[in-house]
Image (cartoon, helix red, strand yellow):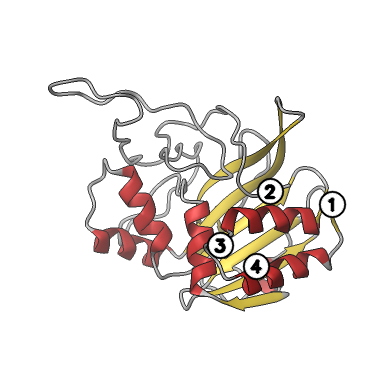
Amino acid sequence: MVDPATGVSFPGSMRFWDSAEMECLGVGVRRKRVAGTVAVKVYAVAVYADRVGARAALEGAAVGAGDAGALGRAVAGGAYDKVFQLELVRSVSGETFSGAIRSALSGKVPSGELDAFVGHFASLGELGKGSNVVLRCRASGTLEVAVGGGQVPWARARPGLKIRSADFCRALSDLYREWPARPPPRAGAAPATGGPPPRPPRGDPCPASTPPPPPPLPQSGATRSRRARATPWPSGPGSWPPREGRPAVGGPGA
């Protein structure tokens, strides 16, 4: 999958050290506002998940396809393997990078765990352009962190930091709740290939780019506002191709 805002490409599926094959559910871009008016790109992010676990989370939640918020919460809060793979498109210090994530998660994660997270990245010094950060949340509630100079063969990598914290994993998942860009395939269905990825549902602010609103749905009675309108879940490859929209500012990143 290619993030259209940065041109960064991520594999459609990937293994991360001892994980099963995980599928890329969506991509986005993190921006940061500087000088009050200019929003610069900081990193592209791809979200991977165990397709079996993600599908079970959706089916177990029994939410309607038009309820994007409930779908996002069901997938983000599910107890299964998830990976957030970040590729920096500009250099930033490890301390600045992790400090911004700490600010976003403050009050949701114990301070001692955030200290360990920031301390690990501070010890790495500068994260150059093209550096990759992998944040893996295991089903058991353990966060594992690996950093590479690029998109290395992650199946052969090993995490440099482990934090046993279901709170940390839940907070990270909630932070990136605007994924997935498409739901995991139904049981027995072949993985989608080719074509542009469908756009993600609108949701809470997160590091992913904020897309334009979807086409309007049929209304009955009084017309609801754009903010209140439900967003249908994308039906498959090619649905609502992503376009670069308004810059996502705030949240984690440099």
Task: Please say if 179 is above or below 223.
Answer: below
Q: CA distance from mark 2 to mark 1?
A: 14 Å
Instruction: Check disc 3 and report its element: helix, strand or loop.
Output: strand
Left or right position of 141 against 89: left
Q: CA distance from mark 1 to mark 4?
A: 23 Å
Q: Residues within 10 Å of mark 1 (few under 14, many from 20)?
A: some
Dot in front, 4 or 2 = 4
Instruction: Check disc 2 and report its element: helix, strand or loop.
Output: loop
Dot in front, 4 or 3 = 4
Residue marked by disc 2: 253
Q: Position of residue 149 (x, y in %)?
A: 81, 59
Residue 128: which disc? Answer: 1
Q: Could you tell me which residue is drawn at 40 percent across and 70 percent down?
A: 79
Please say if the residues under marks 1 and 4 sit with CB atoms less than 8 Å apart. Answer: no
Using the image as rendered, state which of residue 173 and residue 27 is in the foreground. 173
Q: Position of residue 184 (x, y in %)?
A: 38, 55
Q: Residues within 10 Å of mark 4 (few under 14, many from 20)?
A: many
Q: Position of residue 234 (x, y in %)?
A: 36, 39
Please say if the residues under marks 3 and 2 sit with CB atoms less than 8 Å apart. Answer: no
Amino acid type of disc 3? Val
Dot in front, 2 or 1 = 2
Q: Residues within 10 Å of mark 2 (few under 14, many from 20)?
A: many
Using the image as rendered, state which of residue 10 and residue 175 is in the foreground. 175
Q: CA distance from mark 1 to mark 3?
A: 21 Å
Q: CA distance from mark 3 to mark 2?
A: 17 Å
Q: Position of residue 236 (x, y in %)?
A: 37, 42
- Which quarter of the figure has residue 83? bottom right
